[in-house]
Image (cartoon, rainbow, N blue to C red):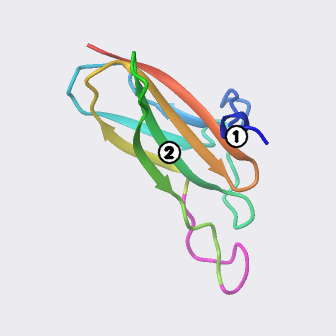
Amino acid sequence: MGKLSQHIREADFKSEKHVPVLECPDRVKAGEWFEVTASVGKEIPHPNTTEHHIRWIALYFHPDGENQVFEIGHYEFNSHGESVQGANQGPVYTHSSVKTQVQLKKSGMLHALAFCNIHGLWESGCNIQVA
């Protein structure tokens, strides 16, 4: 059967449209707010149709030297052109991108998971140094 972790895929976002892209500073000051942007489709656009879309992005932080991983946020994208008139006939679409403010007290790894309704889970991460 396997573990869930065996089904989380990784790749370079420049060649794979499903990989979440994290945009954040490499270094931050302890306790100061900074902006993090997570998106899917930065280099290669991902479809946003009723049939094929990014359903959500989740952000996590793993502090250096700790076992615990902390969920920063889970962001859902619920409008993909659905309508009573049929698929892709609706008046509302969402783009799979989110900006949030974060403050850290410790260095560690920021992780992003994205879920495509057809191609499953994708992960990326970046190290952030806290001074």
What's the amino acid at mark 2? Answer: Ala
The residues colored magenta run 84-94
Q: Does residue 95 lie above or below 10 as drawn?
A: below
Q: Quadrant of residue 41?
A: top right
Q: In the drawing, does residue 101 fall left or right of residue 41? A: left
Q: Quadrant of residue 85?
A: bottom right
User: Mark 2 or mark 1: which is in front?
Assistant: 2
Q: Which residue is mark 1?
A: 17
Residue drawn at the location 46% of the way across and 31% of the way down: 23
Q: In the drawing, does residue 36 fall left or right of residue 103? A: right
Q: Earlier in the sequence, mark 2 or mark 1?
A: 1
Quarter of the figure with the C terminus: top left
Q: Are marks 2 and 1 in contact (CB under 8 Å)?
A: no
Residue drawn at the location 21% of the way across and 28% of the way down: 32
Label annotation for residue 58: 2
Front residue of this view, candidates 25 and 9: 9
**Outermost residue to the front:** 1
Residue drawn at the location 55% of the way across and 71% of the way down: 92
Q: Main secondary structure of the magenta part?
A: loop
Q: Quadrant of residue 95?
A: bottom right
Q: Is residue 86 magenta?
A: yes
Q: Where is residue 28 drawn, in percent x and y? A: 29, 20
Residue drawn at the location 75% of the way across and 38% of the way down: 2
Q: Where is residue 26 drawn, in percent x and y? A: 40, 18
